Image (spheres, rainbow, N blue to C red):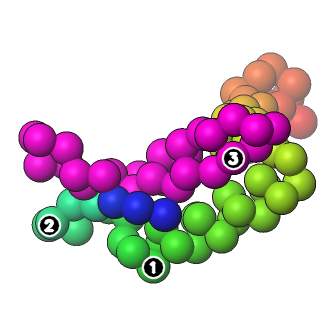
Amino acid sequence: LYLEVRPSGAKLWRFRYRLAGKENVYAIGQDFNDKREGHVSLEDARRERDRARALVKRGVHPPHQRQADKQAIHREHANTFEAIAR
């Protein structure tokens, strides 16, 4: 886990991991000074890193799992005729 500081001043939490012999970087979130919406604190970044580390141990890329989770939530809350009719 590391904090990448860009020339623009943006602070981004990153988790570097290796899977199938290739090095990858998982973007956890951004650290804002004013704690606005979307702020990821050190504590939250460490929690997310631990979750990502567990996925890597199972052989799953964390960004792929995050995308699958978002798609599952979208399907769950889809505003379809069937869902409305029920």
Rendered residue at 60%/39% (across/down): 24
Count of numbered circles in the view: 3
Q: Position of residue 49 (x, y in %)?
A: 59, 65
Kind of residue at disc 3: Arg
Out of 34 and 13, give the one closest to the viewer: 13
Kind of residue at disc 1: Glu
**Label 2: how many residues lie within 10 Å, few (<14), some (14-19) or many (20+)?**
few
* Disc marking residue 43: 1
Q: Which residue is mark 3?
A: 18
Is 49 contained in the magenta span?
A: no
Name which of mark 3 and mark 1 comes first in the sequence: 3
What range is drawn magenta here? 4-29
Look at the picture and state if 77 lies above or below 51.
above
Measured in 3D between alpha carbons, the distance from the residue under mark 3 to the one under mark 1, in whole angstroms, is 23 Å
Measured in 3D between alpha carbons, the distance from the residue under mark 2 to the one under mark 1, in whole angstroms, is 16 Å
Q: Is residue 6 left or right of residue 64?
A: left
Is 25 contained in the magenta span?
A: yes
Nearer to us: label 3 or label 1: 3
Q: Which residue is mark 2?
A: 34
Q: Is residue 36 left or right of residue 22?
A: left
Rendered residue at 58%/65% (across/down): 48
Farthest residue, direction left: 8
